[in-house]
């Protein structure tokens, strides 16, 4: 061993996951969320479908996979929130604590993401209420459009549900790892999968399945622009929760005996399957109802109510679906909040409840910018569109790739081999070298090429 402190010696201050399974559920819970079910179908729709999906899958496997391994290993070695972990590791490995800036960019991105994430999750809660109250019985496309516009036009309704969602997130975080995070993911994740499969059966039998599959899987590369490649990469970061430090954070709670590479493979496969499944549920319904796949953020809120309106028990299905979608969102939201909360506990020495309330309150306030960008400020547009569009673009397409790239560069170039190898000690030397090559060369170059392409340098 080198003279570095090994993760065996440094203890997490917040506790550890009880087992490998809870860690996998927690990271998968973080990964699977609105990104898979709300965002993926609408950006795939807006970017031409099949070809976008292929580029997205390539990004997942050659960029997402090595970076996720890097982030988990940094977290487990640092055993602190992402900022402090990067400071400690930076000092140990390079004598320079400024690496904490990478953690800081991530946490800042997480702050912004959660502020809008909670608003959209609030929409799903509202749709749950609408479903159980029978509003979607026998509706047609115009009525569904009207209901959606009414929601986005109302500051009050959005504020109520955004508040409810943030409160739930704060409560879970305040309860800590074992009583809060673990208990939540153990129930919600299996339930979500079951409902997705039920919906898939519906869409295979009732929707225009062939057209949906064709749209999702048949590539038409003429539709691909450098901007859609950037969107595919940005979404790969977003859906795997990379670049923000929440994977670093969850890695900090991973017991030493567990294999980082194996758990990563499981997590990535689950996340990708759920995104594709969501596409296979939604597009057949879109085409069957003559809706356009290019609707943007409203896509699932316009298609799913239609799907539920004309089936037996649709009311119940709809309610179940939207509540589960909110839960999928919660298991992601907690991962967006935990790193900043852990930072506040560890650095400012406050207790968990105070930290969760303070940061939760700040993010909740920021959420109003998103609410307003769907109504009063919807005409206030610059750069990429509304305030919401800009926050989304800045975080997914710029901040997450930059900090994700820096995390992986640190893990592969700046960290000594003996340190990274001691975290990845269960894989063969060849597999270890493949990881270093992907993490240190392929992923950073991939990110840079996509960036330069998007700003038209090539
Ligand atoms: N991955 C989640 C989703 O797909 C959202 C999410 C959770 C996230 N934590 C994150 C996105 C960190 C970026 C960074 O819905």
Image: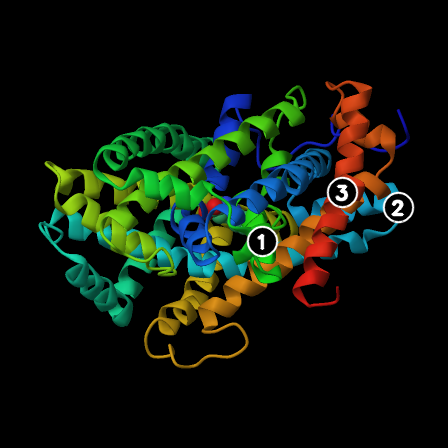
Local packing at callout 3 (Cα closer than 10 Å; few below 14, some 14-19, many 20+) is: some
The image position of residue 32, as x and y in percent, is 45, 40
Camera sees residue 350? no
Callout count: 3
Mark number for residue 94?
2
Residue at mark 3: 442
Considering only vertical position in the picture, is 445 above or below 178?
Answer: below
Q: CA distance from mark 2 to mark 1?
A: 29 Å
Q: Secondary structure at mark 3?
A: helix
Q: Residue at x 26, y 41 (%)?
A: 321
Mark number for residue 234?
1
Considering only vertical position in the picture, is 277 above or below 215?
Answer: above
Q: Quadrant of the N terminus?
A: top right
Q: Nearer the viewer, mark 2 or mark 1?
A: 1
The image position of residue 402, as x and y in percent, is 69, 56
Camera sees residue 117? yes
In the rendered structure, which disc, 1 or 3, sits on the residue that comes first in sequence?
A: 1
Q: Residue at x 74, y 30 (%)?
A: 7
Query: To which quarter of the image does residue 208 belong?
Result: top left
Question: Camera-side residue: 171 or 411?
Answer: 411
Q: Nearer the viewer, mark 2 or mark 3?
A: 3
Q: Residue at x 72, y 49 (%)?
A: 446
In the rendered structure, which disc, 2 or 1, sits on the residue that comes first in sequence?
A: 2
Considering only vertical position in the picture, is 342 above or below 157?
Answer: above
Q: CA distance from mark 1 to mark 3?
A: 16 Å
Query: To which quarter of the image does residue 330 belong?
Result: top left
């Amino acid at each position: 061993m080198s003279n570095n402190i090994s993760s065996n010696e440094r203890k997490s201050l917040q506790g550890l996951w009880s087992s490998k399974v809870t860690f996998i559920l927690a990271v998968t819970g973080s990964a699977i969320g609105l990104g898979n079910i709300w965002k993926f179908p609408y950006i795939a729709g807006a970017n031409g479908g099949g070809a976008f999906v292929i580029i997205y899958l390539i990004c997942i496997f050659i960029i997402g996979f090595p970076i996720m391994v890097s982030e988990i290993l940094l977290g487990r070695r640092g055993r602190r929130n992402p900022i402090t972990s990067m400071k400690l590791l930076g000092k140990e490995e390079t004598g320079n604590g400024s690496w904490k800036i990478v953690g800081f960019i991530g946490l800042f991105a997480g702050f912004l993401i959660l502020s809008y994430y909670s608003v959209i999750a609030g929409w799903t809660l509202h749709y749950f209420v609408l479903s159980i109250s029978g509003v979607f019985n026998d509706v047609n496309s115009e009525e569904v459009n009207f209901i959606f516009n009414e929601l986005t036009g109302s500051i009050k309704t959005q504020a109520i549900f955004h508040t409810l969602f943030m409160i739930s997130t704060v409560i879970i975080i305040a309860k800590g790892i074992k009583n809060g995070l673990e208990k939540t993911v153990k129930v919600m994740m299996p339930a979500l999968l079951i409902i997705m499969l039920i919906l898939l059966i519906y869409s295979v039998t009732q929707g225009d399945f062939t057209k949906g599959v064709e749209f999702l899987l048949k590539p038409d590369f003429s539709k691909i622009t450098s901007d859609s490649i950037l969107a595919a990469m940005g979404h790969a970061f977003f859906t795997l929760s990379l670049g923000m430090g929440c994977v670093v954070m969850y890695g900090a709670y991973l017991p030493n005996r567990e294999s980082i590479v194996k758990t990563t493979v499981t997590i990535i496969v689950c996340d990708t399957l759920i995104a594709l499944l969501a596409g296979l549920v939604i597009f057949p319904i879109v085409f069957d109802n003559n809706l356009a796949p290019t609707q943007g953020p409203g896509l699932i809120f316009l298609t799913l109510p239609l799907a539920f309106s004309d089936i037996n028990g649709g009311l119940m299905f709809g309610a179940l679906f939207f509540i589960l979608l909110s839960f999928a969102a919660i298991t992601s939201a907690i991962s967006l909040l935990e790193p900043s909360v852990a930072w506040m506990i560890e650095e400012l020495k406050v207790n968990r409840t105070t930290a969760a309330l303070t940061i939760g309150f700040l993010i909740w306030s920021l959420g109003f910018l998103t609410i307003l960008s769907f109504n009063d400020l919807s005409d206030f547009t610059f750069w990429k569109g509304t305030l919401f569009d800009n926050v989304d673009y800045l975080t997914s397409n710029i901040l997450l790739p930059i900090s994700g790239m820096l995390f992986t560069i640190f893990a592969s170039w700046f960290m000594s081999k003996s340190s990274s190898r001691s975290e990845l000690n269960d894989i063969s030397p060849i597999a270890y070298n493949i990881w270093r090559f992907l993490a240190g060369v392929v992923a950073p170059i991939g990110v840079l090429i996509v960036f330069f392409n998007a700003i038209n340098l090539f």
